[in-house]
Amino acid sequence: MSESLFGEKKLGFGLMRLPLKDVNDSGSIDTEEMCRMVDMFLDRGFTYFDTAWMYCDYKSENAVKTCITDRHQRDKYTITTKLHAGYLKTEDDRDRIFNTQLEKTGAGYFDYYLLHDMGRRNFEVYERLNCFEWIAEKKRRGEIRHMGFSFHDNADFLDEVLTKHPEMEFVQLQINYLDWENAGIQSHKCHDVAAKHGKPVIVMEPVKGGTLANVPAGVQKLYRDYNPDASIPSWAIRFAASQPQVKLVLSGMSNMQQLDDNTSYMQDFKPLSEEELSLIWKAVNIINEGVAIPCTACSYCTDGCPMNIPIPKYFSLYNAELQEIPDKDFTVQSNYYERLTQTFGAADACIECGQCENICPQHLPIRKYLKDVAKMFG
């Protein structure tokens, strides 16, 4: 796959968090504002738009037609959408949804098409309904140009999927500097698995749904002392774009100010310097100083756990959930938790034997914390 598969610029327009007429109605897309944003995005040389079946209360794909395909020449942009296992009951559902997506977007064909939200349970659906063969046939027929999948699970399972399906051309991963070494999300490890298989990476959630645009005051000072002209989100997006396997970073831009900012520094993208990267790790340390569970992920507690509970991974997800900005409609940590429970014991499976606490070098009240995790995600 060529370096230029996703275009020359490394920023994509994610169409999940669009400008709204009513902030309490995710389907009330302000198409006039979106049209202005689309025009600026294209005028500045960017081309990649990413939508999906369920985005914006199932109306994002309609907005693609209103704001993009009805208004611009087809060779001036690329359109990506996705097929989600949650809407599939039979093989017939694949074409029913795909054909509806073509009609809703008016795209004629899709430049990129993804099997959405790959995890163990969804993978089983995609295998049972022959979706990998189906998407390959769509490519052979020219109805899509490139095929891949988005992924929310652990690195070992990503390795399994790419080993079994080397025909997949790219993978979309959650990568941001707060999740980079998170034991539950494993952004770094997943990035390296993609590199091992030679698959380009598209990044989702580089600003973690706005969390890394609203960092603690100490982090803001750190960044602004170094470069007062750089926006806070720019550090997160440039971090994701600087990873060697990453070819494109998606940003969900919901107003002109965000789009103007993102395109300003991504028009002539410069990877983070070593000095800038060191500031990122200082920022991570500052953010993590406020974590609720000070687990170091040594994993002493998991050896011999009678219920096979991945305690450090659950604690990482719990901490990450508490670091989210308030009032978000959706956070991804619950997805990772649910998928871990398909392989390991759930937090509420703890029988309180106390073995973990006896060996924990941090002397943490693990049994209490597991109840907190179970309450949050259970």
Image: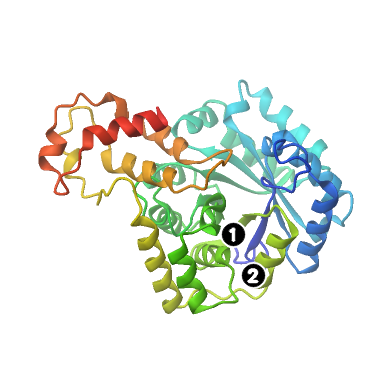
Give the colour scheme shown.
rainbow
- SS category of the residue bearing label 2: helix
- Say whether residue 38 is left or right of residue 222: right
Taking the view exactly as shown, the residue that stands out farthest to the top is: 89
Residue 132 or residue 265, whichever sits in front: 265
Q: Disc 1 residue type?
A: Val
Q: Toward which corner of the image does residue 313 lie, by quadrant?
A: top left
- Say whether residue 306 is left or right of residue 373: left
> Horizontal and vertical percent for residue 175?
48, 55
* Marks 1 and 2 in Cβ contact (< 8 Å): yes
Q: Which residue carries the number 1 mark? A: 249
- SS category of the residue bearing label 1: strand
Residue ID at (59%, 68%): 231
Q: Which quarter of the image is occupied by the N terminus?
A: bottom right
Q: Is residue 309 visible?
A: no
- Say whether residue 5 is left or right of residue 349: right
Residue 376 or residue 273, whichever sits in front: 376
> Horizontal and vertical percent for residue 80?
69, 48
Q: Is residue 116 above or below residue 48?
A: above
- Say whether residue 252 is left or right of residue 340: right
Q: Which mark is residue 302?
A: none
> Horizontal and vertical percent for residue 222?
45, 72
> Horizontal and vertical percent for residue 14?
66, 51
In primary-sequence order, the first of circles 1 and 2 is: 1
Q: Disc 2 residue type?
A: Met
Q: Toward which corner of the image does residue 302 lie, by quadrant?
A: top left
Q: Which residue carries the number 2 mark? A: 266
Q: Residues within 10 Å of mark 1 (few under 14, many from 20)?
A: many
